[in-house]
Image: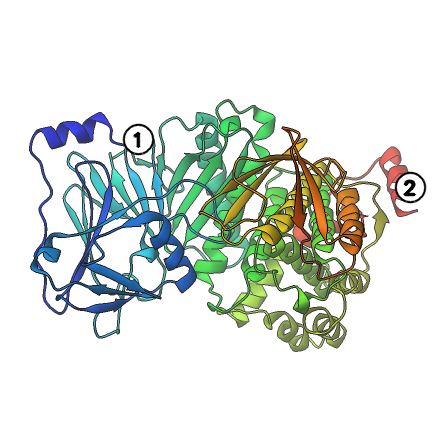
Amino acid sequence: MLKGWLRAAWAMGMLLTCMAWAGESGHVDVSIDRDGSTRAAYRFAPGTSLRFTGEEAWQESVRKAGWKSDPACFTFARNEITLGTDPRCARESIALDWDDKPRDRMYPPLIHLRNGGVLLYAAYLEVLNPAGKSVAEFRLHAPPGGIVSFRERKSSSELVLDSRTFEHGDGGWFYFGPDRFVEERAARVLADDGVAESLEAVMNRLAPQVIELYASRLGAPYAHRPTFYLTWIARERPGRTQQADLVPGGEVRFGVIGSGWRDVPADALGPFETVVAHELAHMWNMGVFKHPPWAAAWLHEGNSELLATSALLALGKIDDAEASKRISNATVECGIYARGRAWKDIREREAGRYPYACGMALQFAIVAAARRDKPALDAFGYWRDAWKSHPTYYEAVFEQEALARGDEALASVLRQTLTSSLPLIEGLKRLYALAGLRTAAATSLSPSLTTAFAGNLMGGIMRADCHGTMSVFTYPDYFHIEYQDELPCQQLRSGLDVVDIAGVEAARRPIEASQAVARACASDRTVALKTRDGETLGVACPQQDGPPLDAALIEFDPAQVAPVLDATRPRPERNAAAASLHAAFLN
């Protein structure tokens, strides 16, 4: 979207010039064209073949949906780009575009901001130089009347990022647009036009407290001054959700999704506070300390969930009961998704909510067991000690830490839980028992878990019917389906609103719907779906890698949960009524 400042600048004749071929060394030019499109030009010798640095699946997805180029000048094969030899190709570039639909485990390639600028994710453009030794140099050209920015640097003309910038594979956001940055206490902040002031205020107030807490409790400061981007995605879509990401080097993008963020009541800001604390935890578990590229996502996502809850508890943003509810929800959600399977047998455990829910449940259980004879140890202390020994960390660190402390009992349960055929929920229960944690049976799913599980159920049905990238949005009484790509689906199509799965109002009653799906598939191999328009569809059965759902609904004692998260915060003395409630809980 072009704003007046950019259109006026073009009218004054401030045109970007094409760069000539730069010989064998070469570089990548990135700029904004006069029509507002974002462009990338690979300025290397004609006929050169270059290899992209990102994952092949991501690169292919980005190119298919968002890259428009002259096929004679730019040809793609797997993870490579080959440059054409026709003389006219020296003037050609690739037009980049994208939509603002969130995609699982994937940074958005291009975000159109309402202020007229764009955010462009560098990793999708990075190529190794012709020798294949390092990432090629970038030359970022500011739009007329605006700036280009990367990390702590910005320019009204050109930024040159040499090959050393990305030598550790950090990626990053390139910003092209008006200079709306504000220097706040914790970070350099750019809030997009129209974002609720209350969100910016929460971020700027909470972030310094969280950063200071992490630095002191985890025993290491963060080396960079962060940059925060606060964006509003899909403003007309109903609802209120959020999606955020962090790039090592200190760039955090907080994206709020849906029209519900237009007017945000004070009591609805809690989820955004959690997102802030979660993303800032990544500054440590992906920046100060690092996991290898092959390490599973539950390691750092579960860690961020655990540390975020611990930080909000330590800062008094949530109380013991809320902290305990979050741990209970993570455990129940993880058990629902696992469906009786062992951790090693859950093939989809890197996607969706698995890394967050199961990662948090597992890591809470590990910390709880590790501190059973060390009451001063908590989540912060556990990870401070683990990272001191293993600044580059991986899944085996948990067992190694237990063995280093002489805790063979914990090491044994970890081996059973993470590598054997023991059902995951049973492994969690053994860890909880080892920690001496008391649990009680819950009677129903929380509203957030109902939504999460319902969406997961509908997502499984979509995967059985379609191939490609799709989204399902769960509303109180229906599912809305959207496709990101043109998909070869059998029955489903973009825009459908599904209200009934296998004869059950699945958005409201996902457990019953899951059991109905299992019964239908056992007899007919198809599942009946009904839309809000009254249409009935017969969809192939989703793959069931475990038994039909039998949710294990449990709750924890808040008095036991809180010290695991934060052992330093004084706990108020409970009165007689509270003690009576506690006794009832345990019984």
Q: In this orientation, which residue lies closer to the viewer: 214 or 190?
A: 190
Residue 565 position (above or below residue 204): below
Q: Is residue 269 visible?
A: yes
Seen in the image, is 29 located left or right of residue 567?
Answer: left
SS for dot 2: helix
Seen in the image, is 22 located left or right of residue 266?
Answer: left
The quadrant of the image that shows the N terminus is top left
Residue 262 position (above or below residue 577): above
SS for dot 1: loop
Q: Which residue is mark 2?
A: 584
Residue 197 position in % (x across, y down): 43, 26
Give, as a three-letter code, the residue at label 2.
Ala
Q: Which residue is mark 1?
A: 115
Seen in the image, is 414 located left or right of residue 49?
Answer: right
Cα distance between the residues tagged 2 and 1: 55 Å
Q: Are marks 2 and 1 in contact (CB under 8 Å)?
A: no
Q: In this orientation, which residue lies closer to the viewer: 332 or 364?
A: 332
Where is residue 345, by image quadrant?
bottom right
